[in-house]
Amino acid sequence: MDNVIRRRTPGARVARLALYAVLLLAALFYLLPLAVMLITSVKPLDEISAGSLLALPQSPTLAPWAKAWGEACTGMRCEGVGGYFWNSFAIVIPAVLISTVVGALNGYALTKWRFKGSELLFALMLFGCFIPFQVVLLPMAQTLGWLGLSSSRAGLILVHVIFGIAFTTLFFRNFYVAIPTELVSAAKLDGAGFFRIFWRILLPVSAPIIVVSVIWQFTQIWNDFLFGVAFSAHDTQPVTVALNNLVNTSTGVREYNVDMAAAMIAALPTLVVYVLAGKYFVRGLTAGSVKG
Amino acid sequence: MSALEIHEVRKDFGNERVLKDVSLAIESGEFLILVGPSGCGKSTLMNAIAGLEPVTDGQILIADRDVTWLTPAERDIAMVFQSYALYPSMTVRQNICFGLEMRKVPKDERDAAVERVADLLQITALLDRKPSQLSGGQRQRVAMGRALAREPAVYLFDEPLSNLDAKLRVDMRTEIKKLHQRLGTTIVYVTHDQIEAMTLADRIAVMRDGHILQLGTPDEVYNDPVDIFVAGFMGSPSMNFITTTLEGQAGDYLVRIETSNEEALVLPWPASRETPAMAGQVGRSVILGLRPEHFSEEDVRLSEQAEGTLLEAQVSVVEPTGADILLRLPLGEGEVTARVGPKCEVTPGERLSLRVDMGRAVLFDAESQQRLA
């Protein structure tokens, strides 16, 4: 039921059907690449070269997945993308946590402890959301060099944290601005200080926006290729870079099934995160926009 | 001992002076109400007392201790907010305890305080609920409970009843009054509702544009206003202001009300309410202030001394309120409101004789708006 008043004339029915048909087609169109990837990743190589792209596998196999994980060649080494997969986690988890915590504190300070110029500072931080990655590659490389963090995992984490703070600050600032400042005044009168008010009053109601921040940052950092390829050494490369190397390594026959399996492996974590927490994501993005 | 003293407090926001040398002092156990239209500075003054905003200049003393530059927590005050400001993630019990916990009060004392407060406000059954599970009136009680748990020197109430519906507001008003009578606490209470101010206060401070215009008991502020603003702000329906001309001489003053289509109405000014300031205004235009209840039907007897002056006018609107009837009738250049008994049978357009109790009338300077007599 859509709660719209309309007469159910035959013409209206036809229009409705046409509408659903268009939507269904659009959905299929978007799902098709994923379907092709999944199907291809479980087909033996001879079926791929013989059959059509969309044909279901005759003798499904998980061998391409195993190869992609543990044996496929990424450049000079042939150890699969498995190690790089864990590399990505080692980069993403600290980067997500640090940028979320800093963003939360920024948002809290910018809304509940306003100071002269706090609005200007926020506007300048917002600017960070619009800086293209390419622009900062060289200065960032220089800075990491000065800090002694070139080609290190810590350096890459630092870059992701800095880039992420603009977004996480925006999220938390817009969430906290809707929380009545009287709450903070009351806690001040009760004798709580800056961090205790944050910890005891603000943080317990921040779950929706924490979810938004974590999903957003996780997806951004996990999917990053440019910083990964520019600022990491070979053994700390994230899975996106490994995937690129795997697909571009040309020795003998091109193993499309292995490529597809590796791509699926690289894409799975963000999909899982969204499926698990997606409904909180939407809820958090719209929190405060509607009174209720 | 003064529970709270404010000396020439000034507050600027940028170039705008929101508080202009405000001074006042209240005794321990006194109930002071700050009242005024929005933007008059009453909430700013409240925040200054609470320490939520620093003052530009001046001094604030709580229990004879200079707190001007102390943090809110160090001031020995508790506050009830307009939005209640209950911590959403905590239960009622935790809300009431929070201030004690922050002050490192031992657990058993905290429990005792919760019990005492819950008992006092009849919220024992709600102690384990979250604020979102409470009605507006219950939230209001919890907010008061949180303030009462700590027993500070001064309680601040910032428009605590304005988010409640009309009936509940009247009930809670009575409860606050009862609480104050029972506990003898010192309260500073901000409101824009002049009825709340009249019913609750020991003293009222009427504010406007960052000044305290008048500080006095409800009776003084209502019957003895210092200027037209205070006179018009207090009382509902508000006081009628009639432009008149002052005539006569000391001992025999008259106010003349010119009317366009009828002959002028001349009312004698009672000798007992003469002031020296009137002498300089003879022959000039002055403003006569009459409250709706200063009119009455012809056959109603007034206070002993004043016989009251009769006037006759054509009633334009009749508004029965149940307890009494409000009449609108032309007088001078405008219309005035008169309050008569509920039995008065009158229809719009009818002419009616009314008695005016000049013994309670007030007179203002037309230019300075200040009180003359």
Image: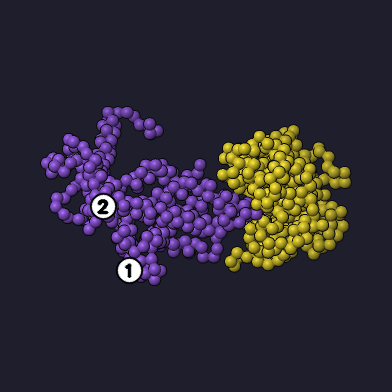
**Mark 2 or mark 1, which is nearer the start of the sequence?**
2
* Place of residue B94 in the rendered image (x, y in percent of width and height, measured from the top left): 63, 44
* Secondary structure category for the residue under label 2: loop
Colour purple belongs to chain: A
Q: Is residue B348 left or right of residue A227?
A: right
In the image shown, does B100 or B355 lie closer to the viewer? Answer: B100
Residue at (66% x, 64% y) in the render: B55
Question: Badge 1 local density, few (<14 within 10 Å), some, or many (20+)?
Answer: few
Residue at (67% x, 41% y) in the render: B141
Are dots 1 and 2 on a single chain? yes
Q: Which residue is mark 2?
A: A79
Residue A138's label in the rendered image is 1
Q: Quadrant of residue B304?
A: top right
B344 lies above or below A263:
above
Q: Is residue B280 left or right of residue A7?
A: right
| Chain B representation colour | yellow
